Image (cartoon, grey):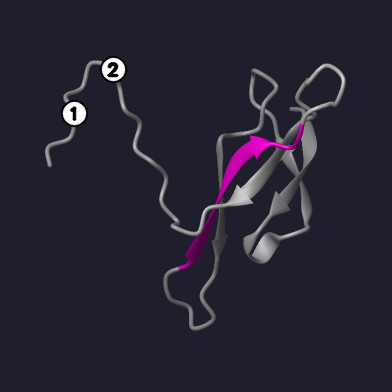
C-alpha cells in the first residue's frame, strides 16, 4: 500500500505530519479519526479531521495535495442520497 506524508492543521495535532495510507484512487480518506485514550481509563475521546486541499499552484491553478483540518464539532455529516426524502423540520 502507498502512503503519503499529510500535514494536520488545528486542534491538538496542529503542525504534525503523519504518513496516511492512500485509497485505490490515490487520495487519503475524506475523514480521519484519532482515538485519544482517557487518562482515567474511560471511553476514549475521538479527534476528527477533514481532508481539504493543501493549496493551488500559481500558474495553472493545479491542486498541490491534501491536508487535514480539525473539525471541532466531532461529528461527521451523514451522507445524503439523491433518492431520500428531505429531513423534516
**Picture quarter with the C terminus:** top left
Based on the displayed image, in which of its 4 quarters is residue 88 positioned?
top left
The magenta span reads 44-55
Q: Position of residue 22 (x, y in %)?
A: 69, 29
Say which element carries label 2: loop
Residue ID for mark 1: 86
Say which element carries label 1: loop
Residue under the point 79% across and 35% down: 4
Q: Position of residue 68 (x, y in %)?
A: 65, 45
Residue under the point 83% across and 16% down: 60
Above or below, comparing residue 26 to residue 5 in the picture? above
Residue under the point 44% across and 57% down: 73
Based on the displayed image, in which of its 4 quarters is residue 21 positioned?
top right
**Picture quarter with the N terminus:** top right
Instruction: Please give the label number shown on residue 82.
Output: 2
Q: Position of residue 15 (x, y in %)?
A: 78, 58
Q: Is residue 52 magenta?
A: yes
Instruction: Please give the label number shown on residue 28.
Output: none
Left or right, residue 43 beside residue 85: right
**Which secondary structure class fits the magenta region best?**
strand
Left or right, residue 78 beside residue 24: left
Q: Residues within 10 Å of mark 2 (few under 14, many from 20)?
A: few
Above or below, comparing residue 50 to residue 45 in the picture? above
Nearest the eye: 40 or 26: 26
Residue found farthest to the right: 59
Amino acid at each position: 500500500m502507498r502512503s503519503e506524508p499529510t500535514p494536520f492543521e488545528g486542534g491538538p495535532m496542529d503542525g504534525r505530519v503523519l504518513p496516511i495510507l492512500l485509497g485505490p484512487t490515490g487520495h487519503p480518506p475524506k475523514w480521519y479519526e484519532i482515538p485519544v485514550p482517557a487518562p482515567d481509563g474511560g471511553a476514549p475521546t475521538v479527534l476528527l479531521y477533514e481532508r481539504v486541499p493543501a493549496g493551488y499552484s500559481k500558474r495553472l491553478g493545479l491542486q498541490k495535495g491534501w491536508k487535514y483540518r480539525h473539525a471541532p464539532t466531532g461529528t461527521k455529516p451523514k451522507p445524503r442520497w439523491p433518492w431520500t426524502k428531505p429531513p423534516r423540520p
